[in-house]
């Protein structure tokens, strides 16, 4: 859903329009749950935070100031709530677990190749620092701009660019090694 549509829906949410809220929820629920779950590796806790995030969207939609996309604003709320969980539980390390990637290819061969590629990508993503993995996920899985990622994480755009640059270099090196048989084959 385009940002202009989300902005219009958010305006309706300020007026407590339940249909608009449902549409925003349906548009953002899956990527937001995935984002939270990847950090916590606990689906129940992720569901609780997801609920809290949407309650905040419902109750505080009027606080959206339009300085970022609606998606970035909502992901920023999720990021902050997730970091609160880490602070409260004194957990310092974000989980490195990534769900398997499904391939919708039409042939069995393409499914096998995609599974092998996904295993390589998953293994290589697991070698990244949590901050690098976080920006890679937001940039490539959530299709956010560097500016929006900076807004979500509350860090400068230059830092985002640096983290993504280094993460891409590490991923390229890791994937090259794995494909050429130099990396670990047991994940």
Image (cartoon, rainbow, N blue to C red):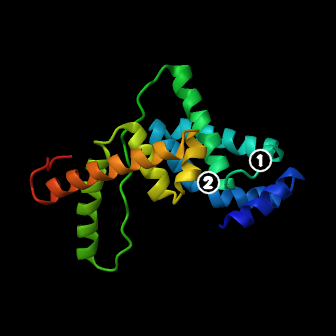
- Residue 92's place in the image compared with 78, above or below, is above
Q: Earlier in the sequence, mark 2 or mark 1?
A: 2
Residue at the front extreme, as displayed? 158
Residue of label 1: 64
Question: Looking at the rendered structure, which numbered label has been put on residue 181?
Answer: none
* Image quadrant in which you'd find residue 154: top right
Whole-percent x and y of residue 185? 14, 50
Tell me what residue is drawn at x 28 percent, y 70 percent. Answer: 111
- Residue 107's place in the image compared with 111, above or below, is below
Question: Looking at the rendered structure, which numbered label has been put on residue 29?
Answer: 2
Tell me what residue is drawn at x 22 percent, y 56 percent. Answer: 175
Mark 2 near mark 1, Cβ–Cβ under 8 Å? no
Tell me what residue is drawn at x 9 percent, y 51 percent. Answer: 182
Whole-percent x and y of residue 98? 38, 48
| Quarter the N terminus occupies | bottom right
- Residue 176's place in the image compared with 82, above or below, is below
Few, some or many residues within 10 Å of mark 1 (<14, 14–19, 20+): some
Q: Nearer the viewer, mark 2 or mark 1?
A: 1
Front residue (pair 105, 77): 77
Few, some or many residues within 10 Å of mark 2 (<14, 14–19, 20+): some
Relative placement, left or right, of 95 versus 117 is right
Relative placement, left or right, of 13 versus 171 is right
Front residue (pair 106, 171): 171
Element marked by disc 2: helix
Residue at the bottom extreme, as displayed? 106
Element marked by disc 1: loop
Whole-percent x and y of residue 66? 75, 52
């Amino acid at each position: 859903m385009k940002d202009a549509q989300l902005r219009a829906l958010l305006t309706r949410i300020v007026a407590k329009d339940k249909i608009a809220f449902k549409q925003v929820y349906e548009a953002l629920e899956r990527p937001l749950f995935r984002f939270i779950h990847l950090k916590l590796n606990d689906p129940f806790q992720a569901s609780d935070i997801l609920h809290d995030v949407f309650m905040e969207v419902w109750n505080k939609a009027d606080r959206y100031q339009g300085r970022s996309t609606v998606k970035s604003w909502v992901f920023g709320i999720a990021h902050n709530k997730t970091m609160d969980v880490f602070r409260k539980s004194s957990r310092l390390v974000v989980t490195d677990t990534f769900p398997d990637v499904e391939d919708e290819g039409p042939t069995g061969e393409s499914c096998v190749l995609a599974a092998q590629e996904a295993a390589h990508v998953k293994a290589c993503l697991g070698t990244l620092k949590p901050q690098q993995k976080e920006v890679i996920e937001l940039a490539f899985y959530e299709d956010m701009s560097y500016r929006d990622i900076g807004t979500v994480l509350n860090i400068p755009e230059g830092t985002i660019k640096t983290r993504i640059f280094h993460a891409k270099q590490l991923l390229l090196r890791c994937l090259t090694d794995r494909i050429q048989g130099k990396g670990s084959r047991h994940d």
